[in-house]
Image (tube, rainbow, N blue to C red):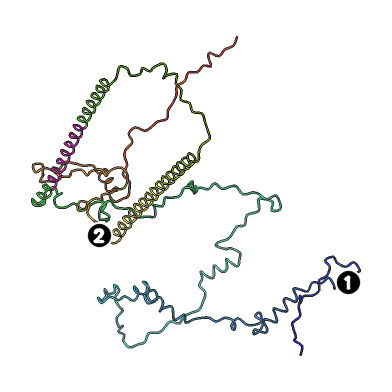
Amino acid sequence: MPVLKPLKGSTEAPATYKQPSRKGKKAWRKNVDVTEVEKGLEELNEETIKGGVIAEIPSEELFTVDTVGDASIPKKFPKLTSKPLKADEIIAARSAVPGPPPSRKRPGDKTTDGIIAEKRPRREYVTHKELNRLRKVADGVHESTVEVPDASYDPWGAVVKPEAQTSTSIEDKRNDKIKAPKSFTKNPISLLASGKTPKAVPTPKGGYSYNPVFTDYEARYTEEANKAVEAERKRLAAEEAERLKMEAAARSAAEAEAAEARAELSEWDEDSEWEGFQSGGEELKVSAKRPGRKSQAQRNRIQRRKDEERRLKHEAKTKVRKAQLEEIKRIAKEVSEREREQNLALANLEQSESSADEDDEVLRRRQLGRLKLPEKDLELVLPDELQDSLRLLKPEGNLLKDRYRSLLIRGRMETRKRITFRRQKKTKLTEKWAYKDFSI
């Protein structure tokens, strides 16, 4: 039995020439394009097979309105669905305390004599005021009329261009090419060793009061005294080290001068009076060797020397490359340590709920920037300067310095140095020679 196979080739109608026929009306049907009609019939057959033509099916059969909602949403998002609205809570709130009595008195029970009062019938009629208004409207008189002015321009004439309105809005002159630095999106890094952010205005303790308690004042006075003694001890130690260094430098310079003098004296004594004299034959003697053919031993020696030089050069390059790799590793390690310190500081900053006091914390060893943090002014008065009243206090300190130092410690600003003498542009003074250029 032969095997039936599907027909090969295109199933479309045979193509015709692009040029229309010139034979007349009998050949016009050859030029009719029925591809769109065939495509539409195919789509209609597919819709009929799938269940019917979509355009003929009513909307109620195609779509359904969900009035219940998805039951899985409250399970996925219990916090969002179970929490009632704030408006519902306010409306549902009822106080246990009864409200105030109403201002108006409730009408009491009317006591009558038992005779039912006659009810006045309700008359459905038009009032005189409304009747007068309707009469005016009928006569053509209206309370609010719209006056239509005559046209003062030719509607069929040239189109009048509207005047350009001057915009009173402020123009945005910012440059879009200038972008904010990446540090704008990061939190500032505190200069405290713990990484916590201190308060902008720290709360003073009892020792800072104008009339402090004796124990608080004594503790603070002792602390500041110890700091001053330690600073003076360090200053004296630095001066002593500098003095010893200068003495050692002077001693080494004197020893070098003495050694140089002894060397010059010994060279003068050892010089021979016949040094520099040569005989006439020695001057005329020339040791010139004629170039000849190198032996195999000489060639081998030269080759070994070249190999040795090549090996030494390769070893030097390898040594330099190893040093560079070590330097790269060291730099990468420093960068990783710095990033770890910053991440640790940020983590401590996020975990700390309460700000730390500036006086109770120690500053970090490695500060930001090249310049050091300015020292804090000594906020302490001597015992004989204490006053009993606020009126007798003298204004001390500088609020601007305190704010600036607070910004530096909190990491809001970088330590800067005031530039007193700015570098100015160099100018050159010249004399005009135009008055000297003349012609006769």
Residue 206 drawn at (x, y percent)? 14, 52
Query: What is the crowding at mark 2: few (fewer than 14 residues within 10 Å), some, or many (at least 20)?
Result: few
Q: Which of marks 1 and 2 is nearer the N terminus?
A: 1
The mark found on residue 409 in the picture is none
Left or right of residue 121: residue 213:
left
Question: Tag 2: residue type?
Answer: Ser
Query: What is the crowding at mark 1: few (fewer than 14 residues within 10 Å), some, or many (at least 20)?
Result: few
Can you name the residue that lies furthest to the bottom here? Answer: 1
The C terminus - image quarter: top right
Residue 6 drawn at (x, y percent)? 74, 82
> Between marks 1 and 2, how big is the CA–CA gap?
96 Å
Considering the numbered disc 2 on the image, is that residue within a helix, a strand or a loop? loop
Name the quadrant containing residue 229: top left
Q: Which of 322 and 150 is in front in this view?
A: 322
Residue 228 drawn in magenta: yes
Q: What stretch is highlighted in magenta?
A: 223-248
Residue 129 drawn at (x, y percent)? 51, 69
Left or right of residue 31: residue 231:
left
336 up-or-down from 104: above or below? above
Residue 305 drawn in magenta: no
Residue at image point 76% right, 78% down: 8
The N terminus - image quarter: bottom right
Q: Nearer the viewer, residue 227 or 377?
A: 227
Considering the numbered disc 1 on the image, is that residue within a helix, a strand or a loop? helix
Name the quadrant containing residue 87: bottom left
Which residue is denoted by mark 1 in the rendering?
27
74 up-or-down from 362: above or below? below
Q: Specify the principal SS of the magenta part.
A: helix
Which residue is denoted by mark 2 in the rendering?
354
Left or right of residue 374: residue 178:
right
